[in-house]
Image (spheres, rainbow, N blue to C red):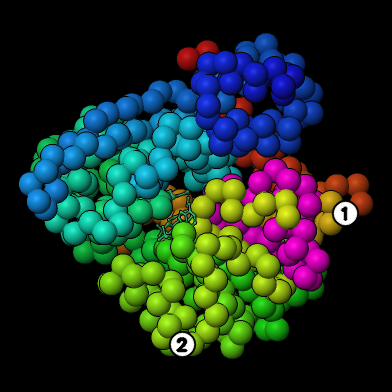
Amino acid sequence: MKVEQVIDNLKRRFPNEPEYYQAVQEVLESIVDVYNAHPEFEKQNLVERLVIPDRILSFRVTWVDDKGNIQTNMGYRVQHNNAIGPYKGGLRFHPSVYPGILKFLAFEQTFKNSLTTLPMGGAKGGSDFNPKGKSDAEVMRFCQAFMLELNKIVGPDTDVPAGDIGVGGREIGYMYGMYKKLRNEANGVLTGKGLEFGGSLIRPEATGYGNIYFLMNMLKTKGIHDLKGQVVAISGSGNVATYTAQKALQLGAKVITLSDSNGYIYDPDGIDEEKLAYVFELKNVYRGRIREYAEKYGCKYVEGARPWNEKCTIALPSATQNEITGEDAEMLVKNGCIAVSEGANMPSTPEAIDVFLKNKILYAPGKAANAGGVSVSGLEMTQNSMRLSWTREEVDQKLQQIMQNIHESCVKYGTEADGYVNYVKGANIAGFMKVAKAMMAQGVI
Ligand code: NDP
Ligand code: 2IT
């Protein structure tokens, strides 16, 4: 395999999809030596079969807004790879959604899901629908119209979507209702469902909690066993960011920042339990902006910027892709940051990753660190199949064990000659090997 050649072919076949090339390039650069050490992989052209999605469904979504106007959006589902289990991955509703974003996310998801130890393939979907400023009724009508098409290719043993940016419990509920209406089947076709109808305890918390569990595993390798004295910068203020903050607080950290797409707040006193409860309400009930936190608590708000210039010892990017540039990374390291653990998918640019690795800080890529979310989705699928539900403690215990296992896989495949653990390499090789072996065993399909 020649990485440049594979990327050039992708660029020719799928023009103007930079995030997709970026994700593929990072993985291929990590696995190229292992791949080339297995001539049977090249003989089966495994690499092309692995980087190109199995199939992509695109569709028009038509819905009626509150004023009676007829609106259209694009909807997509990218089914990337099902070598190790049913397609699995979230749905993103955001104006920036286009096939290149979903292809990068579905590609990443395949390796992430492989790392979880659970039998799940990789997929991603979504729409360029913008939920901001829409009424509940508009969101419901959009979700119903979206499921009218999506239902044709999903199913509990085929493809199991969940949430991502712009898709949380409310949207999953509306989509699940429509799926049942269309198919007359009550099953585990979606994860992240409400607790009353098959959802798993800890699923809302899982990505954030899982990221902190992964971080603790990394810190343990440096003899650090809690977060007392650590100053934590978090970006985002949605599902992942808020539960990350909650678990970090429980372990004694001082959390100083949160953000949204308009700007970030810096609270030098730390965001405590009470202030965090306000953020949950602000985000989930009023669907407000993080600026309102600064107004309520009288702290600094910086419009149009990300939090990475603030001095911290741990950074947990939890908003979106490419939100940490090379310059941001330099600043983080200069300010004494010892660990970066990614709640978001691909939040660090390639330049930022280089800075973290060169400075040999603890750096966990999203496909390892944020795998807790999809892991508990996998546990939700298991509970649905068995038609029972586990307690909070049981699910949390399983989540902790999975994050520990992922950490061990990264250490196994990512430890370098000088003892430094390159978690990027570790996660990519571990994730790849399982998918590759499954594909080889199943023939040319
Ligand atoms: P939410 O929609 O709940 O929250 C997203 C947060 O990120 C919001 O604060 C949002 O601000 C901000 N954000 C979104 N897009 C941008 C942007 N382009 N620039 C700046 N800020 C932005 O989503 P989640 O918390 O679920 O997802 C956050 C990240 O975590 C994503 O990368 C997602 O792929 C990843 N992830 C999510 C998992 C899950 O289980 N939900 C699992 C694993 C990873 P605003 O309100 O202004 O848009
Ligand atoms: O990026 C992700 O792992 C998710 N958005 C969660 C996917 C899932 O199926 O729970």
Residue placed most toward the observer, 4 or 243: 4
Snapshot quadrant of residue 328? bottom right
Residue 162 seen in render: no
Which residue does the image show at 30% across and 34% down from the upper left? Answer: 74
Residue 324 in the image: x percent, y percent?
A: 64, 54
Residue 396 in the image: x percent, y percent?
A: 47, 67
Frontmost of labels 2 and 1 is 2
Magenta stretch?
328-357
Find disc 1 in the rendering and name its residue: 419
Q: Is residue 382 left or right of residue 34?
A: left
Which residue does the image show at 48% across and 32% down from the upper left? Answer: 100
Which amino acid is tagged 2?
Answer: Tyr
Above/below status of 62 relative to 194 = above
Quadrant housing the N terminus: top right
SS category of the residue bearing label 2: helix
Residue placed most toward the observer, 326 or 275: 326
Above/below status of 8 relative to 157 = above
Residue 424 seen in render: yes
Q: Is residue 185 left or right of residue 16?
A: left
Find disc 2 in the rendering and name its residue: 297
